[in-house]
Image (spheres, rainbow, N blue to C red):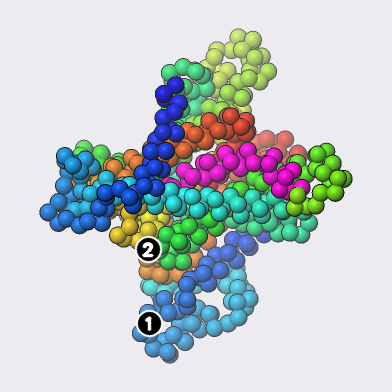
Amino acid sequence: MGARLLPGMVLLAWLAMAIAGPLLPLQPDAVDLTRILAPPAHGAWLGYDDLGRPVWDRLVMGARTAFLVAFWVVSVSALLGTLIGTVSGYFGGVWDRVTVRLIDVFLAFPGMLLAIALAGVLGPGLGNAVIALVSVGWVGYARLARAQVLSLKHRDHVAAARALGAGHARIVTRHLIPLVAAPLIVEATFGIAAAVTAEAGLSFLGLGVQPPHASWGSMIRDGARYMLAAPHAVIAPGAALALVVLSVNLLGDRLRDRLDVRSRPGTG
Amino acid sequence: MLRFVVSRIVSALPVVLGVACLVFLLIHLTPGDPVDVLLGESAQAADRMALRHALGLDQPLHLQLLHYLQALARFDLGVSVYSQRPVLDLLLERVPATLQLAAAALAVAIAIALPLGVVAAVRRGTAWDHAAMSYALVGAALPNFWLGPLLVLLFSVWLGWLPVSGREGLASLVLPALTLGTGMAAILARMTRSTLLEVLGEDYIRTARAKGLPERAVVLRHGLRNALLPIVTLLGLQLGALLGGAVITETIFSWPGIGQLTIEAIQRRDYPVVQGCVLFISLAYVVVNTATDLVYGWLDPRVRSGGE
């Protein structure tokens, strides 16, 4: 029983630390040149990085970055994608054909490549990273929502609602979206893992968070330069990232089984 | 069959056009004026005009798009702002390295995933199954920009077996291929397991067993062969993730491929090269996916006739 609760507990712990980060007595930006790359020791159990900053403190602030980006990317992508996909599938016609083409074009790009290029062209920074990831992220939700709505809109209960005089807005929000929610929620859950990884990836390439702000990705990049002298500086942020992604994926799998959504292979 | 081939290729054309338009628009997403970004604040007005004209930015947007597409049709991807060399030349120089890395990563992924998936499916519910699926879960959670440095730490720094980075000889290919292939192997192993389990429940498997075939022949010849179709499709789809991941992996290992060129170009604000790289990789992805569709149709007559 304990093992089943573990992923949720890991996530909750990180989330709590991410939210409480600014209130905790942390010094993520405190440079201490006497402690450059100092190994883990009493009082700083993850050691110090290449500028003598405490790795644990930066890890907590990195969690804040990761969850902040994941929150915005997943919520905006899911809302935008669901809206576009649902409206497109429901009304059909020219708007639907345009949407389908647009989805096809966006799916033709390897997602991470497009995000990297967009973030690169827009310029580094957290806001631009979110914009880049949303530009790539909405497509999956739109495709899923559209396909679901297409198969649902001719159902009897929709015809009944229409016969009772319900408007389009009411039919979409009350009679369609609740029924398409399950697969979208599963998609969004996996989307959290993808967003956390993608943010770290962009920051690893120097396209995400800018110094001195901490991101797990930029910590891995900086740590990798001094791997020989201080392996702890690269191992810690990666382990945190992998742990969060693993937990989210486990929860996503379980949610998918629970909601009985047909499993779907990942796409780029 | 011919109709199927033609219909697939025709349906890929608008996607190619859309990809080209989106890549064209990339440069117009730069905050402010791309010419200012490229030349810096202190540039002379005449230089600005010259560069603006050279990039065609002094024309209306629809004309720029038209010129861009016309040039593309002649395989003209523009000229690098940084090295003043044609973008196509720069790309072609880098293709072999990326192809080699992608092929090696694919081989790694298949070599890990197929045995794992088959063992997990055949020994369903046993410790084998749990071990294989645990690997799949962990493998999917490890980001390549962490796995790469970890492998370097282990095999290059501590054990000293393999080079840290660069592209000299086969030894230097091992770590990048492992880094890039592991994530794909994880997804592929899960897919192999679930597809094979589905196939093993079919009637013809029972028939094969009933006529006394050894279990190995049943699983490999009758089971795995039928499970291969969805696996091939997944491989095609996953190639996108592979090519996207190659950008990061090549950066980690200083692997001189298109991914590294992309990042270099982004850092130098060499927008024609960024556009060229994105266009090239995306079109390669479209071509591979269309080819996968065709292979699928060739392997499975049901795909050809149905659905269209």
Mark 2 residue element? helix
Crowding near the residue tagged with mark 1, few <14, some 14–19, many ≥20 C-alpha atoms within 10 Å: few
Q: Amino acid at mark 2?
A: Glu
From the viewer's perspective, tell me whether residue A40 is left or right of residue A20.
Answer: left
| Residue B140 image offset from top left, x and y in percent | 44, 38
Q: Which residues are magenta?
A: A171-198
- Determine if residue A54 is in view: yes
| Residue B103 image offset from top left, x and y in percent | 45, 44
Crowding near the residue tagged with mark 2, few <14, some 14–19, many ≥20 C-alpha atoms within 10 Å: some
Magenta span: chief secondary structure: helix
B43 to A19, vertically: above or below? below
Mark 2 or 1, which is nearer the eye? 1
Q: Amino acid at mark 1?
A: Glu
| Residue A267 image offset from top left, x and y in percent | 56, 44
Mark 2 falls within which chain? B
B220 to A146, vertically: above or below? above
Q: Residue at x 21, y 37 (%)?
A: B159
Residue A51, picture quadrant = bottom left
Q: Which residue is mark 2?
A: B264
Furthest toward the bottom, the residue is B46
Pointers 2 and 1 within a single chain = yes
Can residue B128 be found in the magenta stretch?
no
Furthest toward the front, the residue is A23
Q: Which residue is mark 1?
A: B41
Q: Look at the image and tell me in which quarter the C terminus of chain B lies.
A: top right
- Determine if residue A142 is in view: no
